[in-house]
Amino acid sequence: MSTARPKTILLGNAPKLWKPFTVICFQLVSYPKKRERKMPPRKIGREQAPIVVRARPGQATRGLLAAAGTVFPCALGRGGITAFKREGDGGTPLGAMKLLWGYRRPERGWPPPTRLAILPAAPWLGWCDAPGDRNYNRPVRLPYAASCETMQRADRLYDVVAVLDWNMRPAIRGRGSAIFLHIAKPGYLATEGCIAVSPATMRRLLPLLHRGSVLKVMR
């Protein structure tokens, strides 16, 4: 450390004094340009690849469903895959949809363990498909004044069913309703727009599902 004595210098006609100052020695430290970023902790068990559905080549109403590295056959809507879904057109909507919850027929022995909330399908449970009704594309209590379908079908299609969020928030009039993942008819006959799989495939899928699981319909 050194201290300088005051010294007078002249700048034009005005004298100015140098004040004592202290010399401080320091070392420059360089840092790498690429520093490790702190990432938020990953939620184990909640992230997974989407379930992907595509039509079979040359078969508009038959599809292939890929989940967890396995491909399963499935049925699609009688109108094939459509980007312009309308009520009653029989089309399976193109795009990504999330699973919300499900229903089951308790007397028929479903389901295997799953993280998706599965509710019992009561005899009074229906689903409104009337575009002009205030409860369009929502569950309703039967009997109901507007058009709707019962969730306790005579066949086995809704023995277990997962509700997809197509046209749910908000429900736009005429853009389609009751798009589910459910049990297929024998021979994988076409649906009214849903994706349908065999009972054996549904048993394989349910343990993989939770609220927010993504099902992506592609071409």
Image (spheres, grey):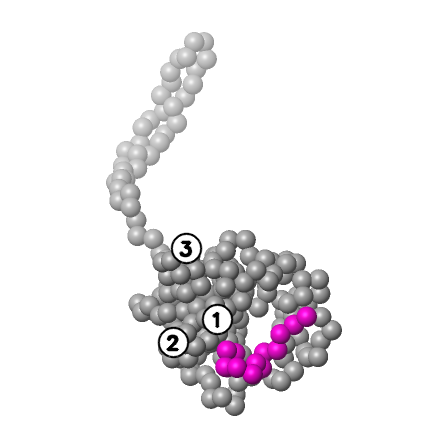
Task: Tell me the SS state at disc 2.
Answer: helix
Q: Nearer the viewer, residue 40 or 118?
A: 118
Which residue is label 2 attached to? 201
Task: Tell me the SS state at disc 1.
Answer: strand
The quadrant the C terminus occupies is bottom left
Which residue is label 3 attached to? 219
Res 127 → quadrant: bottom right
Residue 185: x and y, percent?
46, 76
Tell me what residue is drawn at x 41 percent, y 65 percent: 62
The amino acid pointed to by label 3 is: Arg
Res 208 → quadrant: bottom left
Q: Residues within 10 Å of mark 3 (few under 14, many from 20)?
A: few
Q: Give the extent of the magenta segment.
A: 147-159
Q: Residue at the bottom extreme?
A: 107
Task: Tell me the SS state at disc 3.
Answer: loop
Above-or-below relation of 183 to 172 = below
The amino acid pointed to by label 2 is: Thr
Which residue is label 1 attached to? 181
Above-or-below relation of 183 to 27 = below
Q: Nearer the viewer, residue 162 or 213?
A: 162
The amino acid pointed to by label 1 is: Leu
